[in-house]
Amino acid sequence: MRTYSFLTVFLWSCMFHVIHTMPSEKRTNKHSHSERITGLSENDGKTLHRTKRGWMWNQFFLLEEYTGPDTQYVGKLHTDQDKGDGNLKYILTGDGAGSLFIIDENTGDIHAAKKLDREEKSLYVLRAKAIDRKTGRQVEPESEFIIKIHDINDNEPKFAKDMYTASIPEMSGVGTSVIQVTATDADDANYGNSAKVVYSILQGQPYFSVDPETGIIKTALPDMSRENREQYQVVIQAKDMGGQMGGLSGTTTVNITLTDVNDNPPRFPQRTYQFSSPESAPPGTPLGRIKANDPDVGENAEIEYSISSGDGSDMFDIVTDKDTQEGIVTVKKHLDFENKVLYTLRVEATNAHPDPRFLQLGPFKDTALVKISVEDIDEPPVFSRPWYLIEVDEDAREGSIIGQVVAQDPDIAKNAIKYSVDRHTDLDRIFNIYSGNGSLFISKPLDREETPWHNITVIATEINNPKQSSQIPVFIRILDINDHAPEFANYYETFVCENAKAGQLIQTVSATDKDQPPRGHKFFFELVPEFAVHPNFSIVDNKDNTAGIMTRRNGYSRSKMSTYLLPIIIFDNDYPIQSSTGTLTIRVCACDSRGNMQSCSAEALLLPAGLSTGALVAILLCIIILLVLVVLFTALKRQRKKEPLIISKDDVRDNIVTYNDEGGGEEDTQAFDIGTLRNPEAREESKMRRDVIPETIFQIRRTAPLWENIDVQDFIHRRLKENDLDPAAPPYDSLATYAYEGNDSIANSLSSLESLTTEGNQDYEYLSDWGPRFKKLADMYGGEDSDRD
């Protein structure tokens, strides 16, 4: 029989604490004292001992979030070896020992030094031991115990989001699930009802409800319409303690949107629409827009428009504008005010994507009446045909009528029409038209071989309103008349061999004709009547628009006849029959045994038989050399002797100096030589120009020599013109001096040779008035002192 020792654990707690003792069999920590039990064994008679428990630990329990003024008492450690004399020392180790939990080392009392939070840590594992203060040894082995934190309801439920967003199709049934919201409570779910959450709805009734246990939000009303209300805000509360009074709670907001479904048909806002169109509106012209309203959105509001009936269904059309969902009424065919003034259409608007679930609500389409009135305008003339084709013989006489175009005013007024030919399409003015009735006639002769087709444009214009005009193409085909004679198709180079035999074919000829008969060409060949029986050649018609030239005798001689002329008549088979005579030139040639031509020149027969090719070349070279020598001799004889620069010693012009030169004045007598003027040919020699810098001297362009007795003024003018047009002239300004003073110079002659013999009658004072260029001359002749000198 097992017996527990006297070791006792005393636990005190305050009145606010709940102390729960676990069964001792679950958790026992023991240190045994020896208790002797005497007894004999059957085998060895040894003494048996049993151990006695020194202390036993139970679990300690502590409430969280203690707010009392004193430290919270946990419990007391005690051993039966403690005599109360203070000889033992209690030591505590483990989770929170010394910080959260402190122990009185003398008495073993344990206190919680701080407020504890179960959500942070729900249990603490500590170790306790008792030590003899004197010896320092343990009187009891180290033992482990647990302090559990009891939960209190100090955490409210919290949702995962502060705000939820959800959507649900409109017209959903009652109980349709929208969204599930979930709240969590940090309190201990295993201890009481602190973590038991219950959901309820605070805002959003009567449209929605919430399941109290799962938090699923559901619809509470049937057939909620998006068109009436699209947005809903629902507030959900989560409360712990099973929803009882005193429990903590948290809330969240759920924004619910009703999405659109196609539950509304399109509706026209009015029953009748009216539009107008000018009769000249081309097909595709928009006349107006109509729109049926559909409260739905997106593809549920897409509408298709069509014309269901009406007398204008063939004349008009309606298309849908995908951006605005409007129906655009357009012109389909050309309108005519004179034929019909008013059209009526019944237009139907239908949903493009109907929802089968709502078809029982009624037809998802609507109709409206569209009336279109046609407006009269002044229209241009209209031709009776879209184009005209006229055929005329090429031999038609000038002024003859070849056809007629007809146009009329489509308006009620029926204005008069005048016709004209667009001369841009008939530049040669071959055709003309009567302005009153549109009859076309010929103004110039026609030639099919030159122009087989004529494409002209005829203009019809209202007389009262010239702005109203129309154009029509007229295609004129020129019909062929047999007015051209056939002729040889090619130029034939025909030869006959000297050793030819009678009946031998030497040439095949063919013909061509500019005309184009409807049944095709057919040509006939024969010799002219004068040579109907030719002694040398004959012609054979091959019946395929070709003919063969045949020999009529054996052998031909170049020495007797080197060339034969054979006239041939060519006929066609059209009416009237046309014919022409072509002459075939036949040369007599030397041929080899195979009939290949070797030589056709008659002069070759005159050459000596023993003269070789080398001798002929030598003779030709000698003739060329003699001709060159004759040409050179003639050219040398025609050369004229050069005249001297100074022709006569009495010529006084060689002392004329240039005073308008930027040179050294009258002392510079080397600037000009009058001999050049008297002998123009001497100037043609290549000389260095003195009016340019030496580094960029250009070669003087040689010009044709002038005749001797040319006037000096004319000579200078010609030289000025040559200098202006000379492409080799320098690219900078240069001075070209020709020393011609001109007629009636105000300075008269400046030469002393022509002065009066009596110097006393000569007055040179006027030289001072001529300017700085004549200053030196005035100084030389102007005063008496100068004369004396």
Image (tube, rainbow, N blue to C red):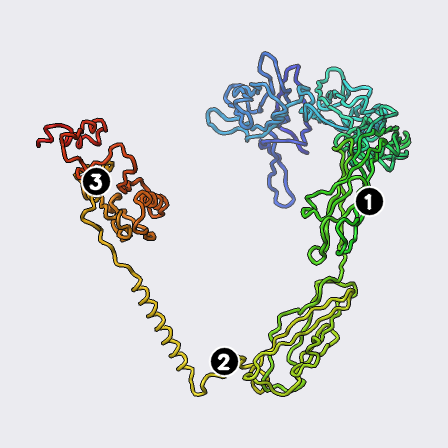
Q: What type is the residue that disc 3 sits on?
A: Val
- Gap in Å between the C-alphas at discs 3 and 2? 73 Å
Rendered location of residue 449, percent (x, y): 70, 58
Residue assigned mark 2: 603
Q: Nearer the viewer, residue 324 or 331?
A: 331
Rendered location of residue 757, percent (x, y): 14, 35
Q: What type is the residue that disc 1 sits on?
A: Arg
Residue assigned mark 3: 657
Q: Label 2 near label 3: C-beta < 8 Å? A: no
**Can the viewer see residue 724 in this picture?**
yes
User: Residue at horizontal 53%, vertical 19%?
Assistant: 104
Helix, strand or loop at mark 3: loop
Helix, strand or loop at mark 2: helix
Rendered location of residue 571, percent (x, y): 73, 70
First of labels 3, 2 by sequence position: 2
Q: Mark on residue 385?
A: 1
First of labels 2, 1 by sequence position: 1
- Gap in Å between the C-alphas at discs 2 and 1? 74 Å
